[in-house]
Amino acid sequence: MKKDKLVVEEIVKYMQQQIKDGAWAVNTKIPSENELCSRLGVGRGSVRAAIQRFNVLGILESQHGRGTFVRSIDISLFGKGHYLDTALLTDMVTIRQARSLIEPELAYEAAANATPELIADLNLLNQQLKAAVGNQELFARLDAQFHMTLAEFIDNPIISNVMGQLLDQTVCLNINRVFGYYGGIYYHPKIAEAIAQRSCEQARNIMKTHMVSELFDPKEHRKNAISL
């Protein structure tokens, strides 16, 4: 794991240099993941983890089916607001515990201030999530996007930064390999419905159950769901 982390750090340094040297200008498309893997002699997972760091800071923007584009050349952002040690993000239990403390409050605030646009976005993501069952990588990305939509709705850059790191696509993919598709398919529509009904406490409670139950045995997860 330490070796993987060092590889990601080297990729990040390379990408920072490309931006600093002007090779990757604002609004230009960077090389594909496959190109970067070939150029640097690294694995695709490491490239994705590096790109995600830039995405979190708003320097890059990855668009499904189109590629990744430069949105800012301010690489000094790497020295600001990177609140979490990436080594901590390798522990799925630690991640879930952190999310169980943060996300129920995000759901509460979303329900209290819900807009038609937010509700429409959540419903669309839930439709896409259901259609993605069987495609582990796409499912993980959509799962993370649902939770990130709630985080960004709060419009707090610290929350967005921290949640962006917790929802790193590689980490989410690993979580879905362990827990499968059930959590997102079962809980996300219920969370969206509670938000649409402006039921703050219900939104908070469902999100709390969603987060906490998956820390334990998936069979117990299903039992806990029955009471909702």
Image: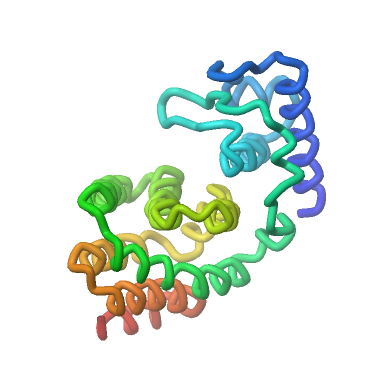
Q: Quadrant of residue 26?
A: top right
List x then y, in percent, for residue 160: 52, 53
List x then y, in percent, for residue 182: 34, 64
Residue at position x 58%, y 24% in the image:
70
Q: Farthest residue to the left: give it.
A: 197
Residue at position x 63%, y 16% in the image:
25
Q: Which one is nearer the viewer's eye here, 12 or 21?
A: 21
Query: Which image quarter is the N terminus in?
Result: bottom right
Colouring scheme applied when the structure was drawn: rainbow
Q: Is residue 144 above or below residue 29?
A: below
Q: Quadrant of residue 227?
A: bottom left
List x then y, in percent, for residue 7: 78, 40
Q: Is residue 48 above or below residue 176?
A: above
Q: Is residue 42 left or right of residue 206?
A: right
Number of numbered callouts drawn:
0
Residue at position x 57%, y 49% in the image:
170
Q: Is residue 176 left or right of residue 7?
A: left
Residue at position x 55%, y 52% in the image:
157
Q: Is residue 34 above or below residue 226?
A: above
Q: Which one is nearer the viewer's eye here, 63 or 157?
A: 157
Query: Which image quarter is the C terminus in?
Result: bottom left
Q: Is residue 58 above or below residue 111?
A: above
Q: Is residue 158 left or right of residue 205?
A: right
